[in-house]
Image: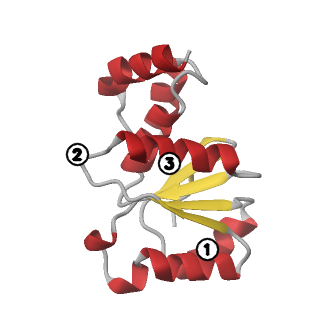
Amino acid sequence: MDIRPITPEYAVSPQIQPEDLAAIKAAGYVTVIDNRPDAEIPPTLHAQTMKAAAEALGLSFVFNPVIGGMMTMENVQVQGAAIAASPGPVFAYCASGNRSSVVWALSQAGTRPVEELVGLPARFGYQLDHLRPQIEALAAKAG
């Protein structure tokens, strides 16, 4: 498992295993967001399995599947609502952490400067420069 803290309140990671959830909780995360569609992964990693394991540890679990190249505004809104509703730090995962970074940046448009929304994920190799126009448009719409 490779926890990549984008901010103190939000981290991303490549695919995790159910047994990783205890370490995620120990690291201080209270909400887990699964951005990986079940169709991409074996049944042992499907959302229902991960949700049961997370909730058994007292973690909140949100399933917000983002299909590569087909992210929707609903994905962005669900991610933003899950982050806003979390009483503490959020841990999100997908195949590489990229989709979880993209949906975070778009969901936080208008709450942080565009430079942060693009620059913070870049520290972990997630290149979001191409999203600047979308982030700016969402920020203008939110503000």
Give the secondary structure at mark 2: loop
Q: Earlier in the sequence, mark 3 or mark 1?
A: 1
Residue type beneath disc 1: Leu
CA gap between label 1 and label 2 equals: 27 Å
User: According to the image, label 1 marks what residue?
Assistant: 21
Determine crowd level at label 3: few under 14, some 14-19, many 20+ residues with C-alpha closer than 10 A.
Answer: some
Residue 65 place in picture, x, y as percent: 38, 59
**Does residue 89 appear anywhere in the picture?**
yes
Q: Which of marks 3 and 2 is nearer the N terminus?
A: 2
In this rendering, position of residue 66 left or right of residue 112: left
User: According to the image, label 3 marks what residue?
Assistant: 78
Residue depicted at 66% across the width and 71% down the height: 23
Q: Which of 32 and 62 is in front in this view?
A: 62
CA gap between label 3 and label 1 equals: 21 Å
Q: Is residue 86 above or below residue 101?
A: below
Which residue is at the far left? 69
Residue depicted at 56% across the width and 15% down the height: 143
User: According to the image, label 2 marks what residue?
Assistant: 69
Residue depicted at 64% across the width and 53% down the height: 90
CA gap between label 3 and label 2 equals: 17 Å
Give the secondary structure at mark 1: helix
Q: How many marks?
A: 3
Q: Which of 44 and 74 is in front in this view?
A: 74
In this rendering, position of residue 42 left or right of residue 142: left
